[in-house]
Image: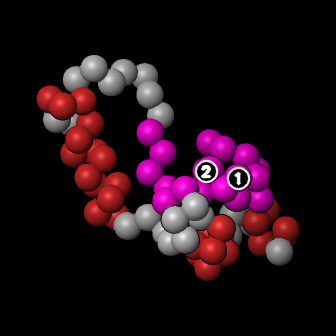
Amino acid sequence: MEASYARGERDPEVMRRQSALGRLVKPEEVADVVGWLLSPQSSAVTGATIPVDAGVLASQLWNLYGGPG
């Protein structure tokens, strides 16, 4: 398993099970956040990282993939 991680391979089923929401993020959900960031409603948001990952970051699953970022 570690060798596959080193090659950059990801197992979507593992990510789904380990995410805080128990599912993967949908492309539309990412698009919704991008749309909000482009809208006047987000005009006070600057220099922020907004994870749209269904809770994968919160689950610390990213440790398997070499850390965040």
Q: Which residue is mark 1?
A: 60
Residue at the left extreme? 40
| Residue at 77% across, 59% down | 64
The x, y position of residue 9, in whole percent, is 68, 70
Q: Amino acid at mark 1?
A: Gln
In the rendered view, tell whether residue 58 sits above or below residue 5: above
Q: Is residue 58 visible?
A: yes
Q: How many marks?
A: 2
Residue at the right extreme? 2
Q: Which mark is residue 24?
A: none
The x, y position of residue 28, in whole percent, is 29, 63
Closest to the observer, 39 or 20: 20
| Residue at 38% across, 67% down | 26
Residue 65 drawn in magenta? yes
The x, y position of residue 43, in whole percent, is 22, 23
Q: Is residue 44 left or right of residue 46?
A: left
Q: Please, what secondary structure does the residue beneath circle 1 have? A: loop
Q: Is residue 3 left or right of residue 16?
A: right
| Residue at 43% across, 22% down | 47
Count neighbours of disc 2 (C-alpha within 10 A) and say few if under 14, some if 14 to 19, many if 20 or more: some
Q: Which residue is mark 2?
A: 57
| Residue at 50% across, 72% down | 23
Quadrant location of the C terminus? top right
Instruction: Report how far apart the C-alphas of labels 1 and 2 lie in the structure.
Output: 5 Å
Residue 9 drawn in magenta? no
Q: Is residue 65 visible?
A: no
Closest to the observer, 54 or 34: 54
